[in-house]
Image (spheres, rainbow, N blue to C red):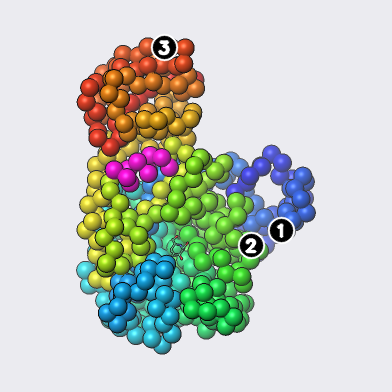
Amino acid sequence: MKRRRPALLCVLGLALLAGPLARLEAADALAPATAALPKAVAETPAARDARMKWWREARFGMFIHWGMYAVLGGKYKGEEIAPKHGAEWIMCDALLARADYEPFARQFNPVKFNADEWARTAAGAGMKYMVITSKHHDGFSMFDTKQTDYSIVRATPYGKDPMKDLAAACKRAGLKFGFYYSQLDWHHPALANNPDKKGQSAFRFNIALDKAKYVAYMKAQLRELITQYDPAVLFFDGQWVDWWTQEDGRDLEAYCRGLKPDLIINNRVGKSKPEDGDYGTPEQKIPATGLGYDWETCMTLNDNWGFRESDHNWKSAEDLIRKLVDIASKGGNFLLNVGPTAEGVIPQPSVERLGQMGQWLKVNGEAIYATQPSPCEQPKWGRFTRKAGRVYAHVFDWPAGGSLEIPAKAGKVAKAYLLADAAHAALKVEATAAGTVVALPAKAPDAIDSVVVLEVRE
Ligand code: FHN
């Protein structure tokens, strides 16, 4: 759905589909023949900008991987299962047959789950949206679905719908709410482990015994997710399997948009190509530069998406704050993951780090939310973000000599002040041939990232 070259896009024909959205049969006049694949749905660049506005301004969201795999916590029969993937892959990594994995549902009873507490943790971290696993690769549904009994509502002692509570809690907390949904499914009878592959690969690259039946199942579940919970975002995943094509992705994207036109959908709805969905999804990494289209880095707080009891390798708040700044300086969003326990508790080390990020954002959020990418090369001492008439210098390494060199490309600096200084007292600025030198106080206001606001004439 991302338009890479709107100006070149030539509309050659319009085929109407049932439903509110017309499906645009278009081919870019200058594009190679492969562009004959139909685009997903029609939308002008202005309409797309309006739809993406809140997401682009949000910059920071909570990813949640929560499912039946939390009951195992990375172990099977007391043995730690080598984290070939993440703890949420344990059915695959332990090579469990469906009959051996299903009974864990009877132990899944998240009696400590408190939706408002999760929403408060996200909002307190300065996050603006939440994306939670409605169904991961294990095929277990975490919502009230009529399509299968293999769900938290029908197959567990908990017997309730946590997604309904979480959607409502997010609304109360002012957070946008979204779902992760996996095309890959190790439980549905229309799919099967790949008989031509060994071990975990048989799960990872499973096959479709009856693709039409499974796609109909997915569409029925997505209709439930979209009409019952009103999500703002759909994060698809598991798109790498051979039986899922880019055309399947376009069809699914058009189906979902037909139910909710303002949905924001990731590129894994198709085959993770730049033209699939609304945004790119670099995972566990931050691109060296912006990508020329909307993108979001998703990342774990430790080394696992799902809860792994033995994983204490938590990233520091300093590392996480600087990652958020680096991502924002390149025009991306940061979807940071928590993996709650089977009892419904977000691990305390996650809560602590998110709290520290929230404290930093309380003071410096102006330099992150609704910002544009840096106007110039990354400085050695930190990063730049910007808004109209302002450039934000994020200083990670406070200069010992007390002066900060700002390149001319940042603009003509009329005034500079510390964002943490409520009085906005002007710092001494001096124009030089290379740009501007700003005189800084001896002590940095923040050990992790101190923001100097530069009021500029562009
Ligand atoms: O296999 C999944 C994995 O479990 C996790 O959900 C991540 C998060 O984006 N996506 C896939 C790996 O790329």
Vertical placement of residue 10 versus 263, above or below: above
Q: Going 49% across and 22% down the picture, which residue do you hit?
A: 409
Residue toward you, 390 or 99: 99
For the record, the magenta segment spans 318-327
Residue 421 point in image, percent of width and height? 24, 25
Mark 3: few/some/many CA within 10 Å (<14, 14-19, 20+): some
Q: Going 40% across and 30% down the picture, which residue do you hit?
A: 380
Residue toward you, 380 or 289: 380
Q: Amino acid at mark 2?
A: Gln
List the residue tagged with mark 2.
Answer: 246
Vertical placement of residue 366 versus 163, above or below: above
Q: Going 48% across and 75% down the picture, which residue do you hit?
A: 200
| Residue 37: image tag | 1
Q: Nearer the viewer, mark 2 or mark 3?
A: 3
List the residue tagged with mark 3.
Answer: 431
In the image, residue 66 lies in the stretch drawn in magenta: no
Predominant secondary structure in magenta?
helix
Q: Amino acid at mark 1?
A: Leu
Q: How many marks?
A: 3
